[in-house]
Image (cartoon, helix red, strand yellow):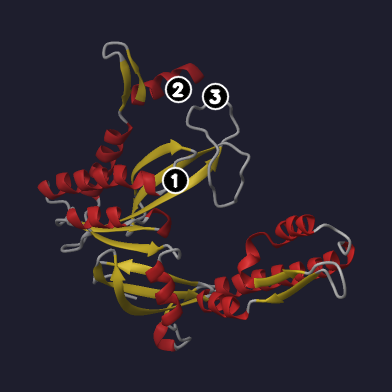
Amino acid sequence: TKDAFLTCLDRVCGEDPDMGGLVDRTERLDEELFRAWRERHPLPVGEGEVFAYALTSVLFFGVTCPLAELGYNARETKDQLQVNLALLVTRRERQPVTHAVFEGSRHGAATVRNFLVRVVRLGQRDEEKGLVPKGGTLIWDRGVVSKDHVEAVEAAGWKLVCGLPKTLGVVKEVLDRVEVPWRPETVVRVTKTTTIYAVETEADVYGKRRRLVVYTNMARAQRERDQRNEALAEIGGKLDTLAKEGAQWKEAKLHEKIGEIVGRWGEFLEIRVRRRGEGPRVACRLHQQALRAAERGDGKWVLLATDPERTV
């Protein structure tokens, strides 16, 4: 029955009147379940543990969950409550290791340190039992990367494979400098929908000379380029229309309307608003240098790989 089910859940996480507070056994249960599973399914001799970490947003349609908040999600839904589910799995078997549910407003970087503590503790216990060699490798995406997190992983004796955010200055430099040729020797993965090419390089990242991998997803590159070109073509048409319809508008009103039309594509456009007189009120041309720079980064990302065995 529903009441019996909820009573069982209270044994996992619920108010304990004897302790006078909330008791959450979720983390301990996760660890014990994984440890029992790993004992039955040991890694090959000499192979280290490799964990993959991800945080995903789950839209929440109820109104009573205290964790459900407005926050960022991949679908860019801004007016819907959500919770954030964090999950750690083994790379080899894709076996869940541990999980947590965070507030919907919590961003990925703010969840990593909690999981690092769990991973290190789990690894230490398994080393004592001889289940895994000392340390291992963590994999996570670029949304949760920071210098502090990278250094914390290294200090714990673990290695790391992670994406680097394109907002980092060194990443912009690497993407602009490194070409990824479409050649047989650079193919790392082929699927039904795309081919991924990759090359290795080095750069100074987070205070050290580090090994990096630059890869290109061909299908993603084409989608990004098409999306940008289609958006800019549409904006150009709207600005041409505005130049005629707004011939008698005040300059402030024109600038406001231009901002609405251009949106996030402003870096690719050079726009001038003329005073009343001869010629169109709004003149627009493409910023060719910005376009070429964007095209060099289409479908390209940079991975940080402190584990030398994880090669392209």
- Residue 133: name its quadrant: bottom left
| Kind of residue at disc 2 | Phe
| Kind of residue at disc 3 | Thr
- Residue 307 seen in the figure: no
Q: Residue at x 63, y 40 (%)?
A: 79
Query: The C terminus appears in which quarter of the rendering?
Result: bottom left
Query: Label 3 to label 1, Cα distance in Å?
Result: 21 Å
Label 2: which residue?
5
Residue 66 coordinates in the image, percent (x, y) = 49, 27
Q: Is 110 left, or right, of 157 in this rendering?
A: right
Q: Residue at x 28, y 63 (%)?
A: 206
Q: Is 167 left, or right, of 271 in this rendering?
A: left
Residue 282 coordinates in the image, percent (x, y) = 79, 69
Residue 267 coordinates in the image, percent (x, y) = 61, 68
Query: Label 2 to label 3, Cα distance in Å?
Result: 19 Å
- Residue 256: name its quadrant: bottom right
Label 3: which residue?
64
Label 1: which residue?
107
Residue 251 coordinates in the image, percent (x, y) = 78, 59
Question: In the image, is residue 260 above or below residue 277?
Answer: above
Of residues 273 and 155, the one nearer the viewer is 273
Question: In the image, is residue 102 above or below residue 119?
Answer: above
Of residues 136 and 213, the one nearer the viewer is 213
Q: Residue at x 30, y 42 (%)?
A: 114
Q: Nearer the viewer, mark 1 or mark 2?
A: 1
**If you read the primary sequence from the N terminus, does the residue marked by circle 1 or circle 2 appear first?**
2
